[in-house]
Amino acid sequence: MYYNKLSGREYICLLFYVDDMLIASKNICAIDKLKKDLSSEFEMKDLGETKKVLVMEVERDWKRGKVSLTLKGYLKKVLQKFNINSDIVSTPLAPHFKLKATMSPTIVEEC
């Protein structure tokens, strides 16, 4: 993962997994510039808005300003593979739960 502070509280993040790349930022102009710069150096295809990351599906609710990651498709395949009949239910975090950077695990460097 690479990230860069743009201005104020804006960042741009570049995530890699094997030969896949995901660019995330609130600043569309910064995303477009980064894609242009990268494509001038590397052969790449722009697949548009992210629909899946690894096995997780990305769902957006533009009106409410929310993004969700789900495993619905993956879980359906697992349930079918093992012939388990079950309804899939949503289990969101509690509304009062807020993620903070301080909750992120830290790496203890070895001496």
Image (spheres, helix red, strand yellow):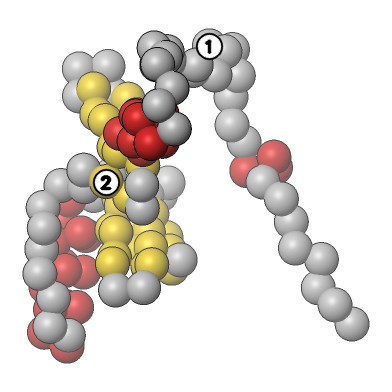
Residue 65 on image: x %, y %? 28, 24
Q: Which residue sits furthest front?
A: 83
Residue 24 position (above or below residue 74)? below
Q: Is residue 28 visible?
A: yes
Of the image marks 1 and 2, the number of the one nearer the N terminus? 2
Residue sitting at x 60%, y 19%:
97
Residue 90 on image: x %, y %? 43, 15
Q: Taking 91 as reference, is 15 left or right? A: left
The residue beneath circle 1 is 95
Camera-nearest residue between 11 and 76? 76
Quarter-of-image position of residue 71? top left
**How many numbered circles are shown?**
2
The reply to whether dot 1 and dot 2 touch (C-beta < 8 Å) is no
Q: Is residue 68 visible?
A: no
Residue 76 on image: x %, y %? 34, 29
Residue type at mark 1?
Pro
- Residue depth check, mark 1 versus mark 2: number of the one nearer the observer: 2
Residue type at mark 2?
Lys
The residue beneath circle 2 is 52
Residue sitting at x 81%, y 66%:
108
In which quadrant of the rendered image does the N terminus lie?
A: bottom left
| Label 2 element class | strand
